[in-house]
Image: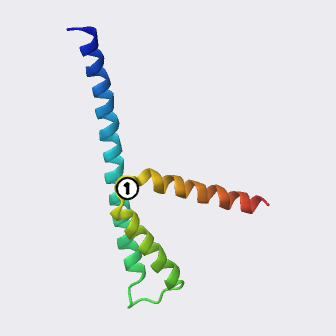
Amino acid sequence: MELSTIKLLIYGSYGLTILVAYFLIAMIYHINRSGQIKLLGFTLDPKRVSRNRKTVKNSLERASKEKRMALIWPVFLIKGFVAYVKEKLKKEE
């Protein structure tokens, strides 16, 4: 085998590994959001009295949106990290 063929095989295996890891994380993110939606749906059960119903409903809508767009999970991860850092900085002031 030529050296260039070996390089292509190695780079292809790296690319395939990264691609599989990306989709695996997307699948885990989708399953996580599905569980969160079920839990929030239980919290909004009309038979039970729930405080902060509007906040829970907003969280449910956000989780549903993130579940539909699970393939762009890095965007939501960065957005959550930025919100966390802003909250920490606000508490320190």
- Residues 1 and 55: in front is 1
- Residues 86 and 47: in front is 86
At x 35%, y 44%, the residue is: 22
| Residue extending furthest toward the left | 1
Q: Name which quarter of the figure residue 89 lies in.
A: bottom right
Amino acid bearing label 1: Tyr
| Residue extending furthest toward the right | 93
Crowd tier of the residue under label 1, counting other residues whose Cα lies within 10 Å: few below 14, some 14–19, many 20 or above: some
Q: How many marks?
A: 1
- Residues 31 and 80: in front is 80
Q: Quadrant of the N terminus?
A: top left
Residue 16, image x, y percentages:
28, 33
Q: Is residue 24 above or below residue 40?
A: above
At x 73%, y 62%, the residue is: 90
Q: Quadrant of the C terminus?
A: bottom right
Disc 1, SS:
helix
User: What colouring does the structure picture have?
Assistant: rainbow
Q: Is residue 23 left or right of residue 90?
A: left
At x 24%, y 15%, the residue is: 5
- Residues 70 and 35: in front is 70
Q: Name which quarter of the figure residue 43 lies in.
A: bottom left
Residue 87, image x, y percentages:
66, 61
| Residue extending furthest toward the top | 2
| Residue extending furthest toward the front | 4
At x 57%, y 54%, the residue is: 81
Residue at which label 1 appears = 29
Residue 64, image x, y percentages:
37, 69
Residue 49, image x, y percentages:
46, 90
